[in-house]
Image (spheres, rainbow, N blue to C red):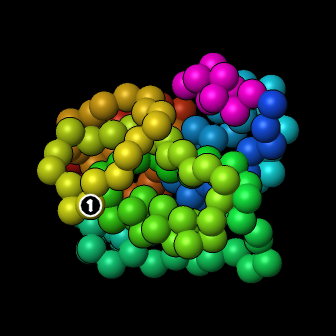
Amino acid sequence: MAARIAADYQGSVVTVVVLMDGALFFVADLLRQLDLPIRLVTLSASSYHGGTASTGEVRVQWPEAVEFAGQHVLLLDDIYDTGLTLSALRARLLTERPASLRTGVLLAKKRPRAAEVPLDYRGFEIEDEFVVGYGMDYQGRFRNLPCIGILKP
């Protein structure tokens, strides 16, 4: 994924928008592999609110005083599940008129989605299971696991 991103953005400064906290480990590892000038912006967004299924309500904490107009923006998240979070964030970012907007995820679930989002970069496709580890959590637990596993409550 890093090689594709580097090739796509060669010669550009990239504004990397990261959905925290789930994408933290993935993005830290990915960015270390990129030889590109970047500007890092973190967002807090969720549609789970403590459970193992999306509530359908996307809550976003948008950063203040961050300019996206005319910037090459790369939106990164841990997992593409219902599509609601990525769809809401892409729609908001597009109102800012970036020069380009691409989207990447570590994991994409094989499932019907409430909102389809074009993915420019995807790490792995997985079955429709609730996963934890490598930054992803369940009620604040399991985020620090060095691997990704299926949670069976």
- Residue at 48 percent across and 62 percent down: it is 90
Question: From what the image shows, is residue 86 above or below residue 38?
Answer: below
> Hey, which quadrant is residue 10 in on the image?
top right
Q: Pinpoint residue 50: horizontal percent, then vertical percent.
A: 36, 71
Count of residue discs: 1
- Residue nearest the viewer, comparing 70 with 54: 70
The answer to whether residue 135 is seen in the rendering is no
Q: Nearer the viewer, residue 37 or 23?
A: 37
Q: Position of residue 125 (x, y in %)?
A: 31, 31
Q: Is residue 127 left or right of residue 142?
A: left
Classify mark 1: residues with Cα within 10 Å, few (<14), some (14-19) or many (20+): few
Q: Is residue 4 magenta?
A: yes
Q: Secondary structure at mark 1?
A: loop
Amino acid type shown at disc 1: Ala
Magenta stretch: helix, strand or loop mostly: helix
Q: Which residue is mark 1?
A: 115
**Residue found at x 73% / y 55%:** 71
The residue stretch that appears in magenta = 1-10
Residue placed most toward the observer, 110 or 49 = 110
